[in-house]
Image: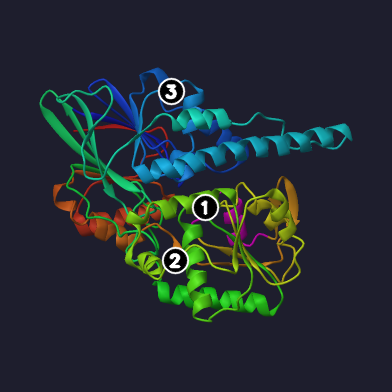
C-alpha cells in the first residue's frame, strides 16, 4: 500500500499551498491556497486545479490564510461540492476572508479593465489586457457552504473513505494563527496504515494572543513548511523597542507610517503591541487606524474565540479591557474614510491589508505615501518573490502600483520577528519528537535558499532523507 503525493502548490515557493494525496482510490487536497506573484503568472497557476474536480473526495485546510484557503471559491466555481474540513475558528475566519478575497478579485479586475478602456480610448498603450475576476462573491458563498467543522484531537474519517480503506485525519494546534492546525493523515488500504503529518504553518512560542504550538504526533512521513528555514528570529523585547524607535522617529519628522499587515493574526498582534507601547508611554499617543474591512471583521472573530487566547490576551479581558481596541484606535470600514486618511497632514499610523502589498486598500496608501521621505513603510512579515512587498524591502528605486511606476523615497524598515512562522531553530525543535519514527521529510512552503539550509540541518541533526519537491512533482510513500 502506498500514498501517492502530488505537490501542486507552495513547492519551492511560499504561496499557493496545495498538496494532492491519493490512496485506495480516494483523492484529497491538503490546503487549497492562492498563489501570489506576477499578475498573469498567478492567474494561470490559480486557474488550474490539482486534479479533475469530479475525482476530488475532500479538502482539508490547515488554516485560513489566503495562501492556504484562497482558491476554494474557484474550486466551487468549477463545480466542486464535496466537504472542506477545518477547525471552527478557521471556518469563521474563512467566512470573512473568502468573501473579501472575492471582493478584491472583482475590484482589481474592474480597476484594471477601467484603466485599459481609458488608455485605449485616448490612444495610449493600454497596459495589462482586460480580464474577468478569478472568482466572485457568489463563488465565495458557495465555497463557505462546503465547510465541515473538525475538533482538535478528534479523528475524522473523510468523505468516501471506509474504516479500512481511505483517509482519516486528526488535527493538532499549530500555534500559527487563530484556528491553525497541523494535520495527521492516516491512509489505510488492505490492512496497512501509513501515517503522514502535514505541518501546515508551524507557529512560535510566546506570540501575542494565540496558544503555543502543540507537540507534533508520531508519523512515518512529514510534509513541513520551511518559510524561515535559513533565518533566526529576534526575541519580542528588542522588537518592541525597535517598533517604538521607528514610531518616534517618524512622528518627530512629521511623517506617517503605513503598515501592510495580514488581516488575520498580524494586524491583531501589531494592534496589541501598539496598545502596550502607548500604555507604557513609550510612543506618542498619535491616531492609529486599521483600514481594512476584513481586519475589522476578523477582529470580531478573534473576540468570539476567547477560548483560543493566551494568558497575555486574557489578562486584558480580566481587566475588562479590549486588547484590540482603545480610544485612539479607529477601525475604518468605508471607502470615504479610507480616502480621507490620504489627506491627513499629521503623524499617524495606518495598518492595512494585504500583508504582501498585492491587493486591497494598502495599495492606495502606498501609492500616496512612498514618494515622501518623511513617511515610513513598515513591513511586518515575509514577502514572497515577485510581490510588491519584496520590491519595497529591496528598496527598488521605482516600483509599480496599479501598473504605474512610482519613485520610492519613503523610509522602509521591517520587524519580521512578528512573523507567525517558526524560524529554523524552532522548526527543528518542533520536529524533534517525530524524528525517531520518520522515514522521509518533504519541505514545502519555502524558497530554495531557505529549503536547502533547513534540509542540511535536518540531515545533520536527525540523519533523515529530505526532499524539496518542485511544482508538479509526484512520488509514492508507504
Q: Is residue 241 left or right of residue 221?
A: right
Q: Find the residue positioned furthest to the right.
A: 122
Label 1 crowd bin: few (<14), some (14–19), many (20+), radius 10 Å: many
> Cα distance, mark 1 to mark 3?
27 Å
Instruction: Classify 271 as above or below 226.
Output: below
> Cα distance, mark 2 to mark 3?
38 Å
Q: Quadrant of residue 162?
A: top left
User: Mark 1 — residue?
Assistant: 263
Q: Are marks 1 and 3 in contact (CB under 8 Å)?
A: no
Which residue is depicted at the point 39% across and 72% down?
Answer: 235
Q: Position of residue 176 (x, y in %)?
A: 37, 54
Q: Is residue 299 magenta?
A: no
As rendered, which of 66 and 433 lies closer to the eye? Answer: 66
User: Mark 2 — residue?
Assistant: 417
> Cα distance, mark 2 to mark 1?
17 Å
Q: Please give the range of residues in magenta.
A: 381-396
Q: Quadrant of residue 147?
A: top left
Q: Find the residue positioned furthest to the top.
A: 54
User: Mark 3 — residue?
Assistant: 80
Ranked by sequence position, the earlier of labels 2 and 3 is: 3
Q: Is residue 170 left or right of residue 122?
A: left
Q: Position of residue 213 (x, y in %)?
A: 29, 56
Amino acid at each position: 500500500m502506498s500514498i501517492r503525493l502530488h505537490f501542486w502548490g507552495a513547492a519551492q515557493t511560499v504561496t499557493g499551498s496545495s498538496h494532492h494525496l491519493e490512496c485506495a482510490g480516494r483523492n484529497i487536497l491538503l490546503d487549497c491556497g492562492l498563489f501570489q506573484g506576477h499578475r498573469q503568472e498567478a492567474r494561470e497557476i490559480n486557474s488550474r486545479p490539482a486534479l479533475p474536480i469530479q475525482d476530488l473526495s475532500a479538502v482539508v485546510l490547515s488554516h485560513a490564510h489566503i495562501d492556504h484557503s484562497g482558491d476554494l471559491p474557484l474550486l466551487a466555481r468549477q463545480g466542486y461540492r464535496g466537504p472542506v474540513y477545518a477547525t471552527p475558528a478557521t471556518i469563521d475566519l474563512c467566512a470573512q476572508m473568502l468573501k473579501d478575497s472575492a471582493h478584491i478579485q472583482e475590484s482589481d479586475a474592474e480597476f484594471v479593465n477601467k484603466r485599459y478602456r481609458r488608455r485605449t480610448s485616448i490612444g495610449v498603450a493600454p497596459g495589462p489586457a482586460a480580464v474577468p475576476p478569478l472568482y466572485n462573491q457568489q463563488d465565495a458563498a458557495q465555497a463557505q457552504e462546503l465547510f465541515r467543522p473538525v475538533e482538535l484531537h478528534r479523528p475524522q474519517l473523510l468523505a468516501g473513505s471506509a474504516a479500512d480503506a481511505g483517509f482519516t485525519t486528526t488535527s493538532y494546534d499549530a500555534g500559527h494563527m487563530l484556528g491553525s492546525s497541523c494535520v495527521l493523515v492516516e491512509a489505510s488500504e488492505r490492512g496497512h496504515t501509513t501515517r503522514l503529518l502535514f505541518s501546515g504553518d508551524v507557529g512560535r512560542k510566546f506570540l501575542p494572543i494565540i496558544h503555543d504550538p502543540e507537540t507534533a504526533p508520531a508519523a512515518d512521513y512529514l510534509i513541513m513548511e520551511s518559510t524561515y528555514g535559513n533565518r533566526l528570529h529576534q526575541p519580542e523585547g528588542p522588537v518592541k523597542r525597535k517598533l517604538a524607535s521607528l514610531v518616534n522617529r517618524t512622528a518627530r519628522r512629521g511623517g506617517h507610517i503605513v503598515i501592510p499587515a495580514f488581516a488575520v493574526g498580524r494586524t491583531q498582534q501589531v494592534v496589541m503591541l501598539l496598545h502596550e507601547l502607548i500604555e507604557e508611554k513609550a510612543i506618542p499617543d498619535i491616531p492609529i487606524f486599521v483600514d481594512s474591512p476584513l481586519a475589522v471583521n476578523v477582529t470580531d472573530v478573534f473576540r468570539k474565540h476567547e477560548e483560543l487566547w493566551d494568558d497575555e490576551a486574557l489578562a486584558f479581558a480580566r481587566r475588562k479591557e479590549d486588547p484590540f481596541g482603545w480610544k485612539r484606535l479607529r477601525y475604518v470600514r468605508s471607502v470615504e474614510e479610507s480616502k480621507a486618511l490620504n489627506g491627513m497632514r499629521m503623524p499617524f499610523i495606518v495598518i492595512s491589508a494585504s500583508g504582501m502589498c498585492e491587493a486591497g486598500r494598502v495599495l492606495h496608501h502606498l501609492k500616496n505615501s512612498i514618494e515622501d521621505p518623511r513617511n515610513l513603510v513598515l513591513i511586518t512579515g515575509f514577502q514572497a518573490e515577485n510581490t510588491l512587498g519584496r520590491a519595497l524591502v529591496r528598496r527598488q528605486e521605482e516600483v509599480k502600483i496599479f501598473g504605474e511606476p512610482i519613485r520610492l523615497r519613503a523610509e522602509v524598515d521591517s520587524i519580521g520577528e512578528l512573523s507567525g512562522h517558526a524560524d529554523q531553530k524552532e522548526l527543528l525543535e518542533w520536529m524533534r519528537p517525530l524524528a525517531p519514527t520518520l522515514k522521509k521529510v518533504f519541505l514545502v512552503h519555502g524558497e530554495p535558499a531557505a529549503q536547502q539550509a533547513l534540509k542540511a540541518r535536518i540531515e545533520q541533526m536527525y540523519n533523515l532523507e529530505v526532499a524539496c519537491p518542485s511544482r508538479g512533482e509526484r512520488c509514492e510513500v508507504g
